[in-house]
Amino acid sequence: MDKLWHFLAGMVISVVVGLCINPVMGFCAGGTAGVAKELYDLYYKKTYINIKDIQFTASGACLGLLITVLIKYLWHEISQI
């Protein structure tokens, strides 16, 4: 269940930032959030960095990038009608 939350967090961050600023910036923000969360766990919770958590967050950010590009493309096409 933890991996699902990482995936969803990466995707939501990517879509929100991607729609507000730029799709690539959204992807970067989603991936950075995953790394930041693991660094938080390492330094404050005193646990180890979980590479799989970073991978799932980045995967969600990647899907968020695709969703954002699709939304922006469709919005552009609809606004042309």
Image (cartoon, grey):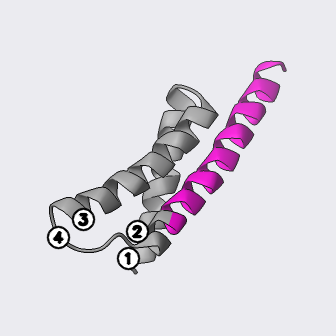
Of marks 3 and 2, the one in the foreground = 3
Mark 4 or mark 2: which is in front? 4
Picture quarter containing residue 53?
A: bottom left
Q: Determine the secondary structure under disc 4.
A: loop
Tag 4: amino acid: Lys
In the rendering, which numbered label is found on residue 47?
none
Query: Which residue matches tag 2?
Result: 5
- Residue at position x 70%, y 32% in the image: 72
Cα distance, mark 3 to mark 2? Answer: 15 Å
> Which residue position is annotated with label 1?
2
Closer to the observer: label 1 or label 3? 3
Q: Residue at x 24, y 65 (%)?
A: 41
Q: Which residues are magenta?
A: 55-81
Q: Amino acid at mark 3?
A: Asp
Q: Nearer the viewer, residue 47 or 9?
A: 47
Front: mark 1 or 4: 4
Element on which disc 2 rests: helix
> Mark 3 and mark 1 in contact (Cβ < 8 Å)?
no
Q: CA distance from mark 2 to mark 1?
A: 5 Å
Which circle's residue, 1 or 4, is located before the other in the chain?
1
- Does residue 4 appear anywhere in the picture? no
Marks 4 and 2: CB-CB under 8 Å? no
C-alpha gap between disc 4 and disc 2: 21 Å
* Disc 2 + disc 1, Cβ < 8 Å: yes
User: What amino acid does circle 1 point to?
Assistant: Asp
Residue 75 colored magenta?
Answer: yes
Please name the residue that numbered disc 4 is placed on. Answer: 46
Q: The disc labelled 2 sits on which kind of residue? A: Trp
10 Å crowding of disc 3: few (<14), some (14-19), many (20+): some
Reading the chain from its start, which is encountered first: label 3 or label 2?
Answer: 2
3 up-or-down from 66: above or below: below
